[in-house]
């Protein structure tokens, strides 16, 4: 290991073909080698990895629900890879390393469990939750003392875009920034859809691509407005979208099955045939 002047450890790349030893230091050395010799790994940044970190967290959730040990081990490894990858790049930047991350976690766990490591006694999990929130508030106050200003929507937790959108709206509503009923939310949705159509209608593909960032903004406004409708109906936008995703996968699977029964591959079909089978899948759902 080579140590920088500020005591940040940058792992030394492994040489040759490494074995799977199960040791963290060997994994860090492997990641260091990938950052040197793999073209894809070399070009990544901490920001470019954000979508992968989110994706791996969701895949871990699915694996746990499947209760398949091999899948769970694989997905836990993928989540760990994201931690290792980020730590490697931050170490390269001279900011912090894996040991700093682990130490920060250890300190936080001890600090947030005074009923385990200190004299405090908490009678049940509800009391633990109350104390946990108190400690988090103390941590936030310490952040503010370091110059990290807190705004009213800072309490919105990280999560999928839909989850954050709904939580942001809920918190803003508590502060009076909201329509009284669903009509305003529906009108806003119509307004945003009209603006998106304006960006797309009667424009060539070249024109749309030249203005793709504006299109992206309008599309985001439509989705945000639709989440607001879900919130007004006391529905969870994330759950509603996942229900749609599962329904789409089920119906598309039905199309594949029916084509296989007729001796065809889906690549050999066309939209007319697939659309007819899609409608058949919907009828099959209603009858089952």
Image (cartoon, rainbow, N blue to C red):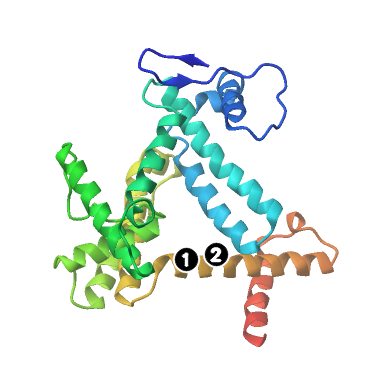
**Which part of the image, by quadrant, shows the C terminus?**
bottom right
| Residue for point 35% across, 45% down | 108
Q: Secondary structure at mark 2?
A: helix
Q: Position of residue 94 (x, y in %)?
A: 38, 20
Instruction: Using a 10 Å C-alpha cutoff, classify the residue at mark 1 as few (fewer than 14 neighbours), some (14 to 19) or many (20 or more).
Output: few
Instruction: Using a 10 Å C-alpha cutoff, classify the residue at mark 2 as few (fewer than 14 neighbours), some (14 to 19) or many (20 or more).
Output: few
In this view, the residue farthest toward the bottom is 287
Task: Check disc 2 and report the residue beneath it.
Answer: 245
Asked if 93 appears above or below 285 in the picture, the reply is above
Q: Position of residue 228 (x, y in %)?
A: 30, 67
Q: Are marks 1 and 2 in contact (CB under 8 Å)?
A: yes
Q: Secondary structure at mark 1?
A: helix
Q: Which mark is residue 118?
A: none
| Residue for point 43% across, 45% down | 204
The one nearer the camera, 183 or 126, is: 126
Q: Position of residue 70 (x, y in %)?
A: 70, 51
The one nearer the camera, 16 or 131, is: 131
| Residue for point 58% across, 43% down | 78
Q: Quadrant of residue 155?
A: bottom left
Real-space CA distance between mark 1 and mark 2, rounded to the nearest whole angstrom: 6 Å
Task: Check disc 1 and report the residue beneath it.
Answer: 241
Q: Position of residue 57 (x, y in %)?
A: 51, 50
| Residue for point 35% across, 17% down | 6
The one nearer the camera, 47 or 104, is: 104
The one nearer the camera, 245 or 170, is: 170
In this view, the residue farthest toward the right is 263
């Amino acid at each position: 290991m080579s140590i920088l002047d500020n005591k940040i450890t940058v792992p030394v790349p492994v040489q040759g073909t490494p074995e799977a030893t199960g040791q963290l230091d060997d994994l860090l050395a492997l990641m260091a080698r990938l950052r040197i010799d793999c073209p894809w790994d070399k070009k990544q940044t901490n920001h470019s990895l954000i979508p992968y970190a989110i994706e791996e967290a969701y895949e871990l959730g699915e694996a746990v629900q499947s209760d398949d040990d091999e899948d769970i081990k694989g997905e836990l490894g993928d989540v760990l890879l994201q931690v290792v990858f980020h730590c490697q790049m931050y170490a390269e930047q001279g900011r912090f390393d894996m040991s700093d991350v682990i130490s920060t976690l250890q300190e936080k766990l001890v600090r947030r469990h005074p009923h385990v490591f200190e004299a405090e006694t908490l009678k049940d999990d509800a009391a633990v939750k109350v104390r946990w929130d108190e400690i988090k508030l103390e941590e936030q106050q310490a952040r503010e003392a370091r110059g990290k200003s807190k705004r009213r929507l800072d309490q919105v937790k990280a999560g999928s875009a839909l989850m954050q959108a709904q939580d942001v709206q809920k918190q803003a509503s508590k502060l009076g920034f909201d329509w009284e009923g669903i009509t305003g939310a529906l009108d806003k949705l119509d307004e945003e859809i009209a603006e998106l159509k304006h960006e797309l209608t009667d424009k060539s593909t070249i024109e749309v691509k030249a203005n793709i960032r504006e299109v992206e903004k309008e599309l985001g406004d439509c989705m945000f407005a639709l989440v607001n409708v879900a919130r007004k109906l006391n529905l969870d936008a994330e759950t509603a979208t996942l229900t749609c995703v599962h329904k789409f996968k089920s119906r598309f699977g039905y199309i594949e099955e029916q084509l296989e029964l007729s001796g065809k591959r889906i690549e050999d079909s066309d939209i007319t045939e697939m659309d007819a089978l899609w409608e058949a899948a919907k009828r099959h759902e209603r009858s089952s």
